[in-house]
Image (cartoon, grey):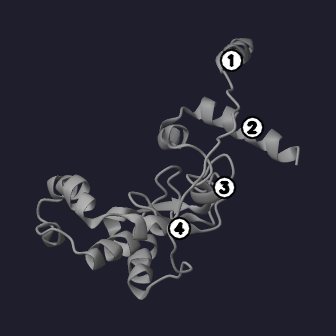
Amino acid sequence: RLQDQLRVYKTVQAIRKNPRKLDEIAFYPVHDKRRETPAYKNVHKKMVRDQDRPCLICGVRNSSLKDPKTNTYGAKAMETHHHVIEWALANAISVEKFNKHLLPHLRKRHPNRHEYKQDFSQKQLLDWVDHHEDNLWVLCDVHHRAKYLGIHEITFPIWGPMDLLGDDFEDYVRAEIGKLKGKR
């Protein structure tokens, strides 16, 4: 027991916090107010409800939101995140650059997908950004939008490996975030 406490103490002493403020200006082109298109609703339903895909970070699923054993972050909803191209940036994306830079990677990753055989038109690009599965990740609301944990709230180098953290480190991070929330 004492050895366990000593190990935890040494681990915590070795953790280095690096609090910082991100000075960011997000530039978005003029666009309509975000509304869910019928095609987006269908793909979202397919990924979240029909396929019951897990959150990429914590693994909770729509079917397990009410189970505290599997919903360890207390998520309330499953959401889809536009991960390659943010929806609000769609009107700023050059279809020529998309076809030159991104489409070859999509073709290589999905060689049998018919939609990647030809270059995209502007409409195809906008549709792909809005509702294609290859531009959507399933995330719980916590890992999508929550302060200190959501992909929209922290930098990707910190968010990206969150699903790989060791249990002891994850517990430490959650405790530290809990302390910060208590200060509000």
* Marks 1 and 2, how far apart at CA: 18 Å
Which residue is tagged 1? 4
N-terminal of the two: label 1 or label 3? 1
* Callout 2 secondary element: helix
Q: Which amino acid, mark 4?
A: Glu
Up the image or down, 80 lies above or below 168; here it is: below
Report which residue position mark 2 lands on. Answer: 175
Q: How crowded is mark 4: few (under 14 residues within 10 Å), some or many (20 or more)?
A: many
Residue on which disc 3 sits: 146
Q: Is residue 37 left or right of residue 117?
A: right
The answer to the question of whether label 1 and label 4 lie on touching residues, with beta carbons closer than 8 A, is: no
Residue neighbourhood size for the residue with mark 3, other residues' Cα within 10 Å, grouped as few (<14), some (14–19), many (≥20): some
**In the image, what residue occupies the spot 72% across and 12% down?**
6
Dots 4 and 3: beta carbons under 8 Å? no
The residue that mark 4 highlights is 79
Structural distance between the alpha carbons of marks 1 and 4: 39 Å
User: Comparing marks 3 and 2, which lies closer to the viewer?
Assistant: 3
Mark whose residue sits in front, 1 or 4: 4
Q: Distance between the residues labelled 1 and 3?
A: 32 Å
In this picture, residue 128 sits left or right of residue 60: left
Amino acid of disc 1: Asp
Q: Which of marks 4 and 3 is nearer the N terminus?
A: 4
What residue is at 21 percent from the left and 59 percent from the top?
103
- The CA span between labels 4 and 3 is 12 Å
Residue 77 horizontal/vertical position (percent): 60, 68
Residue type at the position of mark 2 = Ala
Residue 75's spot in the image, x, y percent? 64, 61
Residue 176 in picture, x, y percent from top left = 75, 36
| Between marks 1 and 3 in the image, the one whose residue lies nearer the viewer | 3
Identify the mark nearer the N-term, 1 or 4.
1
Residue type, mark 3 in image: Ala
